[in-house]
Amino acid sequence: MTGNLPSEFDGLKGNHCLPHPMEGPFPPLFLAPMAGVTDLAYRILARECGADVTVTEFTAASGLTRRNAYSWLKVESDPRESPFIPQIFGGITEEMVQTVEMLQDRADVIDINFGCPAPKVCKNDAGAALLRDPDRVVNMVRACIEVAEVPITVKMRLGTGSGDNTALEICQRLEEEGVERVCVHGRTLRQRYSGEADWEQIREISAAVSIPVIANGDVTDSSSASKCLDATRASGLMIGRGAIGRPTIFYEIKRDLGWITGPAPWGDGGDAIARHWCWNRYLELCDDIYSETRNKNLKRHAVSFTKGLPGASSMRVDLHREGDQKKLGRMVSEYLEALALSNEATVG
Ligand SMILES: Cc1cc2nc3c(=O)[nH]c(=O)nc-3n(C[C@H](O)[C@H](O)[C@H](O)COP(=O)(O)O)c2cc1C
């Protein structure tokens, strides 16, 4: 499975211009790359729920260049995911360049990660640790762009949190190098996920560059989406934790902000009906995509889809014991169906 461009984008590759989503009447909504969450089935589900753009979880250039099968599984796609954007990271420029060369026949855009705070990534001088050295970031991205036949985009944090933040300088320099879009998570490496995302600093960056800036951090519903767009003047929004177990967030934001008027894929039922529909659809997509392999994320999604719902914690005890993926899928489906029916009965 690869991410082939549909025919309307014929000729795009090599022209270095981003495909469609930036050109719509409303700011595009991105599903954030999230390791252990945004598998292919989840990315397609998020799109069906209104996400305009999806990105794979970050994948190590070192794994891809060594032809590690597990790494290559992470950058699988499907024609339903268009544009297809694999995200890569690494601390060695030669490996990053080689990865771009290996991926570009299947990718529509390649995204480079300078945002990961994980110690095992940062200790190898990759991810957000590189933000301490703007020259290294710029040199690495320049080398990738030199070989790239598809647009290169970058996702980063504000800086490392020690010394001045570097994201503004880096974004300005990356624009000159030919990066086509940047996504900025309004936190530093040191902050990891604590505190609040600093949307003001994202605004300074969007004011300083002409390429699209996607704002990321703490968007969890239509109200925060609207506030974040106002505060940052960004060209689009990226949503991470708010979309875990809740792919409906994309539709809800678009509906609440008046960007769409059509019916939701799950009809006009309430939250439980929406969750039940999404879970069943996720299982269907998993059957289709992982027919011969286990989906290592299934249990995690099962927990996320039922988080905070009545009776979910006792159901979860059984869920954790269940080793059979089909049975686990059915257990959650039956639980959500019963909840949807009882909610209907209460409302009715
Ligand atoms: C479980 C998890 C995994 C993540 N994995 C990645 C990743 O692979 N690549 C990446 O660029 N960011 C990753 N992130 C960061 C998110 O993409 C995003 O920048 C961050 O969660 C802030 O956005 P939010 O406030 O909407 O969650 C991850 C975040 C979480 C919670």
Image (spheres, rainbow, N blue to C red):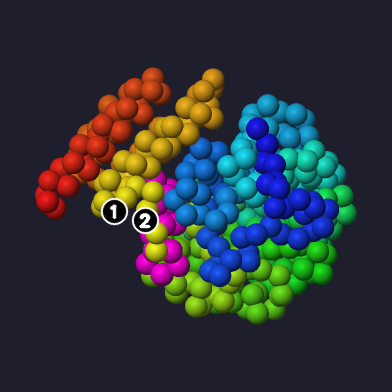
Question: Could you tell me which residue is drawn at 51 percent across and 77 percent down?
Answer: 231
Labels in figure, total: 2
Residue 11 lies in the magenta-colored region: no
The amino acid beneath tag 2 is Pro
Mark 1 or mark 2, earlier in chain:
2
Q: Is residue 278 left or right of residue 191?
A: left
Q: Is residue 276 above or below residue 252?
A: above
Q: Is residue 136 above or below residue 310?
A: below
x, y percent for residue 331: 29, 28
Residue at numbered disc 2: 263
Question: Furthest-front residue in view?
Answer: 7
x, y percent for residue 189: 59, 58
Tell me the quadrant of the picture where the N terminus can be found: top right
Q: Which mark is residue 317?
A: none
Residue at numbered disc 1: 268
Q: Magenta stretch: give its range.
A: 243-260
Question: Could you tell me which residue is drawn at 72 percent across and 34 percent down?
Answer: 63
Residue 251 lies in the magenta-colored region: yes
The amino acid beneath tag 1 is Asp
Describe the element under mark 2 as helix, strand or loop.
loop
Q: Quadrant of residue 304?
A: top left
